[in-house]
Amino acid sequence: MAMTSSEGNDVDEIHSIMKLFGRQHRAFTDDTARFFMDVELTMPQFRAMVTIRRWGRQTGRELARRLHVTPGTLVPLIDRLEEQGYVRRVPDTDDRRLTWLELTPKADRLFERLWGMGAVRMAGAVARLLPSERADLRRLLGRVAENLDTVNRSLESRGDRLPRQTVSTLRQPRPT
């Protein structure tokens, strides 16, 4: 089925917006790379920590499912995070078969440091906007965040990972 002119314009517009998001992201790339080299975390280790941070304490099986890995793959990764002091294993008080994975205060400080790196730059950039522009940005970012939550819930309910689709296949009706 051929794309209509309106859909083609939507795809071009979304592509242009995504390029701007990429430009903003690149402003933090060097600092982020240095950060990961300083803390000696691999990307799989960081993904595990982000997942625990997002969903709260969870079992190894739950974490493995969310990361799309086997529990056996996860064990040495969690061992290393525990050795580094970022994750702790907590036995369940009611069911001795269960062990919960939790982030430690050291992990919380690591996330605060990571957030702080970008927050200073972003605050400086946003401060240069006019008050009406900041209000528009706040409103639009709120809408984007709500839409991301909706997309994420949809993907999670289907057990999907990030889709490898083109923008045109993700097109949703606009609110009227």
Image (spheres, rainbow, N blue to C red):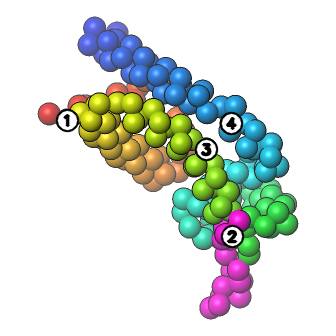
| Quadrant location, the C terminus | top left
Q: Is 101 contained in the magenta span? A: yes
Who's the residue at 28% across and 8% down the image? Answer: 5
SS for dot 1? loop
Badge 3 is on which residue? 117
> Local crowd at mark 4 within 10 Å, few (<14), some, or many (≥20)?
some
Who's the residue at 71% across and 65% down the image? Answer: 106
Callout in the foreground (4, 1): 4
Alpha-carbon distance for marks 4 and 1? 38 Å
- Nearest the viewer among 77 and 130 is 130
N-terminal-most mark, 3 or 1:
3
N-terminal-most mark, 4 or 1:
4
Callout in the foreground (2, 1): 2
Alpha-carbon distance for marks 3 and 4? 8 Å
In this rendering, the answer to whether 131 lies above or below 94 is above
Q: Which residues are magenta?
A: 90-106
* Residue type beneath disc 3: Met
Badge 1 is on which residue? 175
Instruction: For the residues labelled 3 and 4, say whether their Cβ atoms are less than 8 Å apart.
Output: yes
N-terminal-most mark, 2 or 1:
2
Q: Position of residue 156 (x, y in %)?
A: 49, 51
SS for dot 2? loop
Badge 4 is on which residue? 31
Alpha-carbon distance for marks 2 and 3? 20 Å
Badge 2 is on which residue? 104
SS for dot 4? helix
In this rendering, the answer to whether 66 lies above or below 102 is above
Alpha-carbon distance for marks 2 and 1? 42 Å
- Give the left or right position of residue 90, taking residue 145 as reference: right
Callout in the foreground (3, 1): 3
N-terminal-most mark, 4 or 2:
4
